[in-house]
Image (cartoon, grey):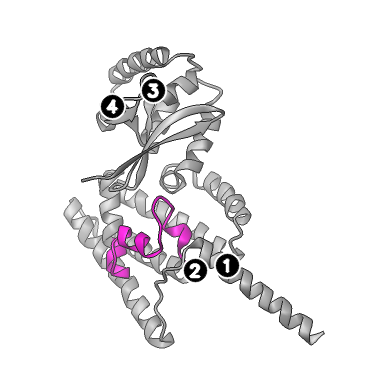
Amino acid sequence: MTKQDNAIQMFEEQKIRTIWDEEQEEWYFSVVDVVGVLTEQTTLRGASTYWAVLKKRLKSEGADQLLTNCKQLKLQSPKDGKRYKTDVANIEQLFRIIQSIPSPKAEPLKMWLAEVGRERVEETLDPELTIERALETYSKKGYTREWINQRLQAIQVRKELTDEWQDRGVKAGIEYAILTDEITRAWSGMTTRQYKRLKGLTKESLRDNMTTTELILNMLAETSTKDISKAEKPETFIQSQEVAHRGGKIAEIARKALESETGHPVITPKNAAELHAVIVNMIEETAKSADKKE
């Protein structure tokens, strides 16, 4: 059974109800709450009415697939505290809805969504905007320049892979997740969820908690998958899954070869906080050594 955690996120002092789906590993947002923010509705009823009218308009414009993909999940009502089925959308779907609503808050809201669910947004935002924001974000968090360079390259590799998947008819969301899982399992020996558990992660980004070597191997797996897919042009999802497995296996060969040479495992349980601590210790040790020499 899918584990789902409700949470209230704040955007400019306005509450937006959200729910985290552990199985699909992504946030879902109350569409009515987002619509209320964009249209500056003062009541939930007003926002609900606007969303009902917008749904009819989107349907008449041929956006049936978008409306079909939006699901209903139980969220706590701000009125009586009880949980009711509510229209929710993931970040990719919300971007499309936001584009249909003229509002000065559209761009700030997109940036806020980027902070809440950055990993998924990396697949939908303009890469240049993603890189600029990522540079600033990662630098503030204390990541090394080497790690940041590899992470930004990983974003580009991921974008190229998902573009290829899109060309092959793979559906964003659950099918992307299945193929990503196939790649991760093939090169690391673990599913994405198992990998995150090893590092003690829940809702955090796995890639943000990888070492430089882990990132490079993950990039090798993803770019190999992309190259094989471009060469073979799989026509079905099953064929794309097979390609993903083979792409991941290429990185597995590299991982095992490196481990054989170094005598140390590539995959580490260290997460971002622990990696930062290691870096700080190295800097301190270097400083102490310099002091002794003087």
**In the image, which residues are magenta?**
183-211
Q: Are marks 2 and 3 in contact (CB under 8 Å)?
A: no
The stretch drawn in magenta includes residue 58: no
Separation of residues labelled 4 and 2 (CA atoms):
40 Å
Closer to us: 285 or 262: 285
Q: Under tag 3, what secondary structure?
A: helix
Residue 193 lies, in percent from the top left, at 31, 57
Mark with earlier residue (1, 2): 2
Amino acid carrying mark 4 in the image? Leu
The stretch drawn in magenta includes residue 199: yes
Amino acid carrying mark 2 in the image? Thr
Residue 111 lies, in percent from the top left, at 53, 37
Q: Under tag 4, what secondary structure?
A: helix
Mark with earlier residue (4, 2): 4
* Residue to which mark 1 is pinned: 277
1 or 3: mark nearer the eye = 1
Is the residue marked by circle 4 packed among few (<14), some (14-19), or many (20+) residues within 10 Å? some
Q: Quadrant of residue 281?
A: bottom right
Residue 236 lies, in percent from the top left, at 18, 51
Separation of residues labelled 1 and 2 (CA atoms):
15 Å
Is residue 94 toward the left or the right of residue 245 in the image? right
* Residue to which mark 3 is pinned: 32
Residue 50 lies, in percent from the top left, at 39, 14
Amino acid carrying mark 3 in the image? Val
Separation of residues labelled 4 and 3 (CA atoms):
14 Å
Is residue 270 toward the left or the right of residue 248 in the image? right
Is the residue marked by circle 2 packed among few (<14), some (14-19), or many (20+) residues within 10 Å? some
Amino acid carrying mark 1 in the image? Ala
Q: Which mark is residue 212?
A: 2
* Residue to which mark 4 is pinned: 67
